[in-house]
Image (spheres, coloured by chain):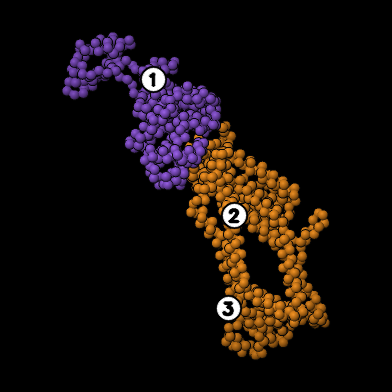
């Protein structure tokens, strides 16, 4: 089953269109990366899913049901702009937010205890938020997002403001939540996160979705039959009708790295066979584009036109 | 509904548990008895030290006799002016009054010597004493006897009655009604302003701390706004109830304490002793007593139950009406300073009600200005409670209440539409045009 299906979501403001007929499908129990540059419309889409604002047109269904106000209780939301009541104590605050999500007081108290223990911050209960550091407040906010064990967790730039140690801690928690069966939507423009965590991605640019699919599949689509060979000696004469030498760099004395693009239909093994006779090969790998490459090429409009066309036909 | 209740609870507890709440709740009621106590103390000191001012009178015309009264004690001097001045200078007495041998048809040349600049009151009192005496002398010249003169100065005190439509007579007292209207009107004005601004402040805090986005992912913006308004209302009601109880207990306590020391009591006792000897005094005393009785009678005729009900109704109605507007203002801005430009137009009608209370309601409670002020929902909370004690026809009251309910439903609806958009908008330069756009914006 899909955790969320959005169909043709459009949201217009007086001066601009925030979302232009955007459709996404988020499979259950996945980590779904919602990518896009600032101002692309990610936050608008997230707010619509959270029912903070309404779309002008389009439909959303959550776990097979049309989106309804009761669904706020199965959604956990960590906004990009973090915020808690500054004058309120950590414990009271978590209790309040959990109760607003429909937990009973008793249940909320028990779960808060578990989470504070998990993060080893049990003695924070009586601390006021204004006395916490930014990173500490972020932890509290993360707890408030997941306390009611939401089936759908929406994290907007979850790692901003965390140091590497805490970012690791949060990453572990996110993976654990996924193991337990939650579906996680990740909104970010930080590609390293996407690379390591996401199973599915969608790319939104200028109010439109321009790409969606399983991460592996997306990356495969962007393979351009390009290979990187490290070799000794630069006597390199490959048949020009089969290969194109894109660039060649010197790594160290007489050791070179060459990037070559093979003609369509020539597979990796054939490439090895072709070059092994010409030069002393030190390493060989296919150049698979990183998410960052894909992101930048698509957003800047520098991507291969044919590829783009291919993607749009998808 | 359950969620609104949670929000109300948070708003309430969060404020009530603050130290500042405890301090203001306890200190404010202490201020009133302190003022009353201070005034009573000064009054007693004054009364104890208040002796009649001694005035030396050098009357060369031999026509003036003054009776000693509460304010002045007269000492006749039979010397030349120079000697009189010398004698006066050796004393600590208030003044030396010199009356030359004057023609009562042209009373000129009366002189008053004092050591300090006397107050206008005292000079005026002396002048009127002399004028009265000249007046009497003239009447005597026309052969009018003492008794007739006395009867020419009757003592009149208007006893007031309201004639109801059924022809029933109800005694009333403009003074009490004025005080009641004045006090209740100001109370509502203060309550709406103080707690309205608290709502605004609370909304701004939620917006600037960004917590609002988390909250509205759990509840509807309208629920959040309503919960906040109601939560702060309950804080206000609690605080006001505590104030009223503490003020009345402490005030009556201080009054009772000082009341025992009041010299009036001793005066009264002396007077009762003298009354048997002096029948004229007894008559005056009886009149005095009947006045006190009348006052108490008037108090018991004022429909306090009705006033209390009306007060609470307008107290809440006015608060809800303005509270929603304050919430809208808070949602539209990013800081307290920015709020000021919108705060003024919101408080303006409230201010008009407040000014109208003094200009129209208390002076002419049944005039058409008073009618409109107490019927239009924006001014009615202050105006109607100011007016209610004077008696308001049932249909006017019903109309006013109905309009107030309609008024706060309307402002809450308008405010809700601005609020839901405003709380998520930061860094926008807000103008009335922008507010109108937000208001029109679809869900």
Q: Position of residue A147 (x, y in %)?
A: 45, 36
Q: Is residue A196 visible?
A: yes
Q: Quadrant of the N terminus of chain B?
A: top right
Quadrant including the C terminus of chain B: top right
Of A261 and A74, nearer the camera is A74
Classify mark 2: residues with Cα within 10 Å, few (<14), some (14-19) or many (20+).
Answer: few
**Which residue is the site of mark 1?**
A218
Which residue is painted at 64% across and 79% down in the image?
B52
Residue at mark 2? B241
Q: x, y percentage for residue A60? A: 52, 25
Q: CA distance from mark 2 to mark 3?
A: 50 Å
Circle 3: element type: loop
Q: Which residue shows up at 25% across the image and 9% down it? A: A239
Indicate the secondary structure of the residue bearing disc 2: helix
User: To which residue does mark 3 refer?
Assistant: B116
Give the class, few, some or many, for how many residues have Cα within 10 Å of label 3's Cα (few <14, many ≥20): few
Identify the hue of chain A: purple
């Amino acid at each position: 089953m899909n955790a969320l299906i959005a169909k043709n979501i459009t949201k217009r403001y007086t001066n601009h269109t925030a979302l232009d007929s955007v459709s996404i499908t988020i499979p259950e129990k996945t980590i779904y990366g919602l990518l896009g540059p600032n101002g692309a419309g990610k936050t608008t889409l997230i707010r619509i899913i959270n029912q903070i604002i309404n779309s002008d047109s389009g439909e959303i269904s959550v776990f097979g049901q049309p989106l309804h106000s009761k669904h706020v209780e199965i959604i956990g939301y960590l906004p990009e702009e973090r915020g808690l009541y500054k004058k309120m104590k950590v414990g009271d605050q978590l209790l309040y937010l959990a109760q607003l999500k429909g937990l009973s007081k008793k249940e909320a108290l028990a779960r808060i205890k578990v989470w504070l223990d998990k993060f080893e911050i049990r003695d924070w209960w009586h601390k006021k938020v204004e006395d916490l550091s930014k990173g500490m407040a972020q932890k509290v906010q993360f707890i408030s997002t997941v306390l009611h064990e939401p089936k759908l967790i929406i994290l907007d730039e979850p790692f901003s403001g965390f140091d590497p140690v805490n970012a690791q801690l949060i990453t572990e928690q996110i993976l654990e939540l996924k193991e337990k069966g939650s579906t996680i939507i990740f909104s970010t423009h930080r590609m390293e996160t996407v690379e390591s965590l996401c199973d599915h991605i969608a790319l939104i640019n200028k109010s439109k979705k321009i790409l969606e699919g399983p991460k592996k599949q997306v990356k495969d689509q962007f393979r351009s039959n390009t290979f990187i060979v490290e070799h000794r000696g630069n006597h390199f004469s490959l048949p020009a009708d089969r290969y194109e030498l894109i660039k060649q760099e010197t790594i160290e004395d007489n050791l070179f790295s060459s990037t070559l693009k093979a003609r369509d239909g020539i597979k990796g093994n054939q490439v090895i066979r072709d070059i092994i006779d010409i030069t002393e090969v030190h390493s060989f790998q296919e150049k698979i584009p990183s998410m960052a490459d894909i992101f930048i090429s698509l957003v800047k409009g520098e991507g291969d036109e044919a590829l783009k066309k291919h993607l749009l036909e998808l | 509904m359950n969620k609104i209740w949670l929000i109300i609870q948070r708003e309430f507890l969060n404020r009530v548990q603050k130290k500042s709440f405890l301090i203001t709740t306890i200190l404010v009621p202490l201020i009133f008895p302190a003022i009353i106590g201070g005034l009573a103390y000064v009054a007693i000191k004054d009364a104890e030290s208040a002796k009649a001012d001694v005035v030396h009178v050098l009357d060369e015309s031999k026509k003036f006799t003054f009776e000693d009264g509460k304010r002045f004690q007269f000492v006749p001097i039979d010397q030349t002016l120079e000697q009189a001045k010398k004698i006066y200078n050796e004393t600590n007495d208030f003044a030396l009054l010199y009356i030359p041998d004057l023609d009562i048809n042209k009373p000129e040349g009366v002189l008053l010597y004092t050591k300090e600049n006397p107050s206008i009151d005292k000079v005026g009192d002396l002048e009127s004493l002399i004028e009265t005496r000249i007046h009497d002398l003239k009447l005597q010249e026309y052969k009018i006897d003492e008794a007739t003169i006395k009867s020419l100065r009757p003592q009149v005190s208007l006893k007031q009655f309201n004639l109801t439509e059924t022809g029933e007579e109800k005694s009333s007292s403009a003074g009490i009604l004025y005080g009641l209207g004045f006090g209740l009107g100001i109370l509502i004005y203060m309550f709406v302003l103080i707690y309205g601004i608290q709502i605004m402040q609370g909304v701004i805090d939620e917006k600037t701390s960004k917590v609002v986005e988390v909250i509205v992912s759990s509840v509807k913006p309208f629920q959040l706004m309503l919960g906040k308004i109601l939560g702060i209302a309950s804080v206000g009601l609690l605080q006001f109830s505590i104030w009223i109880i503490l003020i009345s207990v402490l005030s009556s306590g201080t009054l009772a304490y000082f009341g025992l020391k009041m010299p009036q009591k001793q005066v009264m006792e002396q007077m009762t002793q003298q009354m048997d000897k002096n029948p004229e005094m007894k008559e005056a005393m009886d009149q005095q007593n009947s006045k006190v009785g009348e006052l108490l009678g008037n108090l018991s005729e004022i429909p306090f139950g009705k006033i209390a009900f009306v007060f609470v109704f307008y107290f809440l109605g006015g608060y809800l009406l303005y509270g929603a507007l304050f919430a809208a203002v808070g949602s539209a801005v990013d800081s307290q300073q920015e709020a000021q430009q919108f705060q003024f137009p919101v408080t303006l009608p409230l201010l008009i009600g407040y000014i109208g209370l003094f200009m129209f309601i208390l002076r002419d409670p049944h005039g058409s200005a008073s009618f409109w002020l107490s019927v239009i929902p924006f001014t009615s909370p202050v105006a109607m409670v100011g007016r209610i004690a004077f008696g308001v026809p049932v249909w006017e009251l019903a109309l006013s209440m109905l309009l107030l309910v309609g008024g706060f439903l309307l402002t809450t609806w308008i405010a809700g539409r601005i609020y839901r958009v405003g709380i998520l908008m930061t860094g926008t330069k807000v103008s009335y045009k922008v507010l109108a756009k937000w208001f029109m914006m679809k869900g």
